[in-house]
Amino acid sequence: MLRKAGMQPGDVLILTKSIGTGTLFAANMRGKAKGRWIDNAIESMLVSNQAAARVLYENGVTACTDVTGFGLLGHLVEMTKASGCDVELIVDSLPILEGAEETVSAGILSSLQPQNTRLRRALSNIEQWHAHPKYPLLFDPQTAGGLLASVPEERAQTCLEQLAAEGYSASVVVGRVKQRGTDDAAITLV
């Protein structure tokens, strides 16, 4: 069983699927999404997390969760609390589903987005990032999202190669686990 607790300073965070299903399906309900955007989102949603969990396990995963309704940031907050660690989240490395940045920039958000944005208090440097085009996607609720996992840094490249070989082509390092600091905000965007 993979748990949310267990991240260790020095671990890297790997995300196995692109994010953006919440905004894309909200746009689709308004007739504002392109067909290929929705097709790509559905294709991603249909990919099981089973093989990804196995690959992560084989590469020494220290903590893991699925990314669903609380969005990437919400699930990361759960991991930082359970592990007693801080995290640097690399915003520009986040894999985004095609069309999601466009729909977010048009102000089309999931109905769950406002409740997820309450977790912004976990960010130590929100003022520097709130205008970034990917920022709203931190709070985007996912349907059948990927896995967010911490693995020892020395295993990250092998893990990513194995994930890609299993069909998780969007898998990427999205952050680094740090020692717990004195600030209540456990996540720094970089």
Image (tube, rainbow, N blue to C red):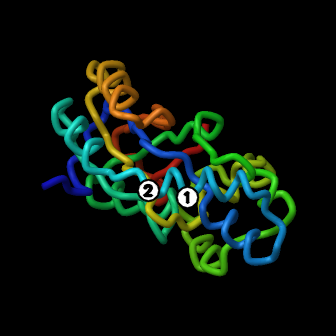
Q: Where is 6 relative to 167, above or below?
A: below
Q: Residue at x 42, y 42 (%)?
A: 16
**Label of residue 42 in the image:** 1
Percent x, y of residue 142 = 52, 64
Question: What's the residue at 78%, 62% (across, down)?
Answer: 33
Q: Nearer the viewer, residue 62 or 83?
A: 62
- Residues at badges 2 and 1 in contact (C-beta under 8 Å)? yes
Q: Pick the quarter of the image with the C terminus.
A: top right
Which one is nearer the viewer's eye here, 125 or 25?
25
Quarter of the figure with the N terminus? bottom left
Front-most of 111 and 98? 98
Q: Is residue 75 above or below residue 26?
A: above
Residue 100: x %, y % from top left: 71, 54
Other-residue count near label 2 (Cα within 10 Å), few / some / many at <14 / 14–19 / ≥20:
few
Residue at the image point whose x is 59% and y is 43% from the top: 189
* Amino acid carrying mark 1 in the image: Ile
Whether 46 is drawn above or below 10: the answer is: below
Q: Distance between the Cα atoms at labels 2 and 1?
A: 6 Å
The amino acid pointed to by label 2 is Leu
Instruction: Check disc 1: other Cα within 10 Å, few if <14, some if 14-19, many if 20+.
Output: some
| Residue furthest right in the image | 106
The number of discs equals: 2
Which residue is rendered at x = 38% and y = 37% of the image? 178
x and y, in percent, of residue 94 in the image = 58, 40
Q: For mark 2, what is the residue?
A: 46
